[in-house]
Image: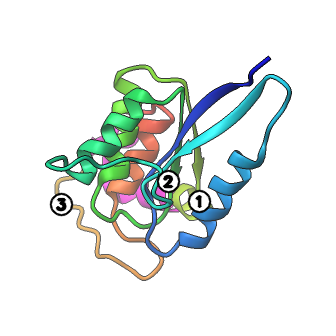
Amino acid sequence: MAREVIKIMVSSVVYGFEKDLRQICATIESYKSKEYEYQVLNSHIGSIYVAPGISNQDACLRAVVDCDFFFGIILPRYGSGITHQELTKAIQIDKPRGFLSHFSVRYARELLAQYMYTDIKNRIRNQNFHFTKTPIFEDTKIIDMYNEAIQDG
């Protein structure tokens, strides 16, 4: 009996975490049982095909649709925003999904909430709040991504 191949899309987050991402992808792909094996779809390891005339972003969003499970990784770097778009797409199409978040994202979310929102409970933005990028946390869009992932606000 042939094993069923389950395609797991690992989000495209990369910068500064290349080794971690490669290790996560390798660990997932190494698991095999009598019934299942996993194929990782990830742009960094080159397993997402980018056809001529298609952008990397469009190829990644197509992979979210084509995968069986979306595994989102939320790190303290925002980058180009493709990871956020992938996460949003997975939620919109109700793709089976799970998320892993760097501990600093959760801490930043808790620490900055008092400044980011005029009403924390309802996530009403403070229009006077301005965040300056730091070496350990890049952009408050990361907090928006986290909130979206946990469906808070």
- Tell me how far mark 1 sits from mark 3, CA to CA: 27 Å
Image disc number at residue 74: 2
Q: Residue at x 40, y 39 (%)?
A: 87
Dots 2, 1 in contact, CB < 8 A:
yes
Q: Secondary structure at mark 3?
A: loop
Q: Is residue 153 visible?
A: no
* Amino acid type shown at disc 1: His
* Amino acid type shown at disc 3: Asn
Residue marked by disc 3? 128
Q: Residue at x 37, y 21 (%)?
A: 93
Residue marked by disc 1? 102
Q: Is residue 78 above or below residue 93?
A: below
- Tell me how far mark 2 sits from mark 1, CA to CA: 6 Å
Q: Position of residue 21 (x, y in %)?
A: 58, 62
Q: Secondary structure at mark 2?
A: strand
Q: Which residues are magenta?
A: 108-125
Tell me, yes or no, whether the highlighted magenta stretch contains residue 115: yes
The quarter of the displayed image where residue 13 is located: bottom left
